[in-house]
Image (cartoon, rainbow, N blue to C red):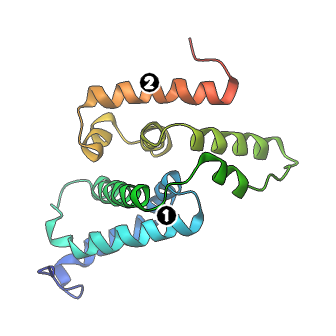
Amino acid sequence: MRSSHSLRDPRYAPIEAEVVNLIPALRAFARSFATSQFEADDLVQDTLFRALRSLDRFEPGTNLKSWLFTIMHNAFRTQYRIRQRELPVSADYFSELTLPVAPTQDWCVLNTRLRTALESITPEHREILIMIAGFGLSYQEAAAICRCPVGTIKSRLSRAREELELEMHGNPLN
């Protein structure tokens, strides 16, 4: 189905410009889902395509960033379900792909440990941590993106923090 707007329609120019300004945030958000930069770039491209195709459905005055994050979230979930059906892969496969490199700076070591810990927690928990702690979204914005109650977001965030703490230090938060 073709969208009812044209990219040259002057009514959409301000929104399109704002979408372009949000690309760095989209790329960062995509990295929380993807295992490689290539996959993240593909997810951003798919998100932008879907957003621009459906620009006439965006309600002016609402949060464009949340709208785009919702599109990305849904695109990732769709891609994830397709991949799960098409390619069952064992956990050992991913450990063979990583090439450990010993960094010299402490911050680099911590960053690597954090990334590894984030990748090892459940995707649902990682997503909530990135949305709220990483991007500073409110509980309400995260709930709108995930299409669930605010209480569910708070609960998931609490469990995500505990899971991350366990991965980072080997003992849960008190």
Q: Is residue 24 above or below residue 90?
A: below
Determine which residue is flagged by label 2. 158
Residue at 58 percent of width and 49 percent of height: 90
Q: Earlier in the sequence, mark 2 or mark 1?
A: 1
Number of the front mark, 2 or 1: 2
Residue 151 placed where, x, y %?
A: 28, 25
Residue that appears at 42% across and 29% down:
157
Other-residue count near label 1 (Cα within 10 Å), few / some / many at <14 / 14–19 / ≥20? few
Q: Which mark is residue 24?
A: 1
Q: Position of residue 63 (x, y in %)?
A: 26, 53
Instruction: Report the amino acid beneath label 1.
Output: Pro
In the rendered structure, which amino acid carries the disc numbered 2?
Answer: Ser
Q: Position of residue 5 (x, y in %)?
A: 15, 81
The quadrant of the image that shows the C terminus is top right
Residue 16 picture quarter? bottom left
Question: At 54% across and 37% down in the image, what residue appears?
Answer: 121
- Total number of numbered labels? 2
Residue 55 in the image, given as x and y percentages of width and height: 21, 71
Q: Quarter-wise, where is residue 15 in the image?
A: bottom left
